[in-house]
Image (tube, helix red, strand yellow):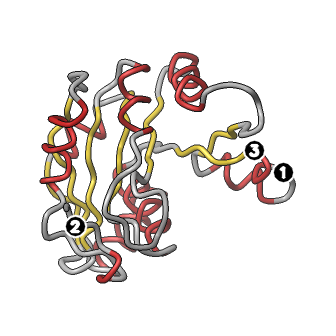
Amino acid sequence: MKQRLYKFIFFKLMGWKIVGEYEENMIHLKKAVYPVVPHTSWHDFYIGLCTRGALGIDINFVAKKELFVFPFGYYFKWVGGEPLNRFKNENKVDAIAKIFAKKDTFRLSISPEGTRKKVTEWRTGFYYIAQKANVPIVAVGFDWKNKQVIVFPKLIPSGNKEADFEVLENYFDGIVGKVPEFSYTKQ
């Protein structure tokens, strides 16, 4: 019932589509890192929620543990959030890889841009998380211009970050975010 409501809202009322390899790389894949690009607005959050609701799957995110206190903590947990202790003397890549190891299903959505503003270079944490957790990377584009969520082919990190980033960054060529001037463009 809930999935049908999400589908109605997302596809019919909002007019969005989900295209690409979503069946294989989201519905059937239990563990993966999903870099979502471009991240230009807070509106991307509800597009992500509607996407996961329409697909009927859990998609997770990590956030500072301070966000997971009453009353909002329950909501963030309910929508797939995992608290991360930023002050603990543990490498964040290692901490998130441990979350993957503890869970049977964990699909981590993350913004490699690290901000909603214009960037010319991605942060690399998502890549090293996937490598350390031994999970694939599945790039996802939020194309506001064409109102579509694009799920790209999965990539197994090869250890050659530059070559892998070349593949991943090329996926997003021409994809326009909610705030077009903040959309990611490869340098």
Which residue is tagged 2?
185
Residues under numbered marks 3 and 2 in contact, where contact means CB atoms less than 8 Å apart:
no
**170 over 15 or under it: above or below:** above
Q: Hey, what amino acid is under mark 1? A: Val
Separation of residues labelled 3 and 1 (CA atoms): 8 Å
Which residue is tagged 1?
69
What percent of the width, then of the height, locates residue 18? Answer: 22, 60
Q: Is residue 139 left or right of residue 61?
A: left
**Residue at coordinates 35% horizontally, 43% vertically from top-left?**
34
Viewer-side label of 3, 2: 2
Callout count: 3
Which residue is tagged 3?
65
Q: Hey, what amino acid is under mark 3? A: Lys
Tell which residue pokes out farthest to the right in this image: 70
What percent of the width, then of the height, locates residue 39? Answer: 40, 66
Label of residue 92 in the image: none
Q: Is residue 56 left or right of residue 16?
A: right
Of helix, strand and loop, which one carries label 2?
Answer: loop
Of helix, strand and loop, which one carries label 3?
Answer: helix
Categorize mark 1 by other alpha carbons within 10 Å: few (<14), some (14-19), many (20+): few
Q: Which is nearer the N-term, disc 2 or disc 1?
A: 1
Separation of residues labelled 2 and 1 (CA atoms): 37 Å
Q: Hey, what amino acid is under mark 2? A: Thr
Q: Which is nearer the N-term, disc 3 or disc 2?
A: 3
- Comparing 181 with 41, the one in front is 181
Viewer-side label of 3, 1: 3
Of helix, strand and loop, which one carries label 1?
Answer: loop
**Residue at coordinates 26% horizontally, 59% vertically from top-left?**
141
